[in-house]
Image: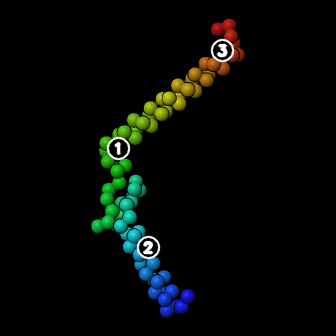
Amino acid sequence: MLDRLYLPLLALCALAAVALALVWPQGLGDRSPAPFGHPPVQRTAAVQAAMKREHEAAMRRTDQAREAVRNIQNQALAPSQ
């Protein structure tokens, strides 16, 4: 391919990639610089509270499962109890 065609095409692709990176949705990460970004959903108070409740519930389930395993192991070691 001729350099006269290839290099301008390469520069155009690079500019398109930079423009796309500026306006692409940010997802749940940190905010992009203005005017492109938006506040992340995970930073809202309602979502933070829901995440905390979910984490605490998962920890309770884990503790209950561990306690059940301990009980089963204790019964296997001392079946007379």
- Whichever of callouts 1 and 3 sits on the residue coming sooner in the sequence is 1
Crowd band around label 1 with a 10 angstrom C-alpha radius: few (<14), some (14–19), many (20+):
few
- Which residue is at 49% across, 89% downward? 5
Q: Nearer the viewer, residue 35 or 3?
A: 3
Disc 3 marks a residue whose amino acid type is Gln
How many angstroms separate mark 1 from mark 3 (CA)? Answer: 42 Å
What is the secondary structure assignment of the residue under circle 1? helix
Q: Nearer the viewer, residue 16 or 47?
A: 16
Please determine whether, in this image, residue 69 is positioned above or below residue 1. above
What is the secondary structure assignment of the residue under circle 3? helix
- Which residue is at 50% across, 29% downward? 61
Q: Which residue is mark 2?
A: 17
Marker disc for residue 75 = 3
Residues tagged 2 and 1 counted as in contact (Cβ below 8 A): no
Question: Left or right: 20 with respect to 71?
Answer: left
Disc 2 marks a residue whose amino acid type is Ala
Please determine whether, in this image, residue 52 is positioned above or below residue 35. above
Please determine whether, in this image, residue 68 is positioned above or below residue 80. below
- Which residue is at 32% across, 48% downward? 44
How many angstroms separate mark 2 from mark 1 (CA)? Answer: 32 Å
Q: Which residue is mark 1?
A: 47
Question: Left or right: 78 with respect to 21?
Answer: right
Please determine whether, in this image, residue 32 is positioned above or below residue 13. above
Disc 1 marks a residue whose amino acid type is Val
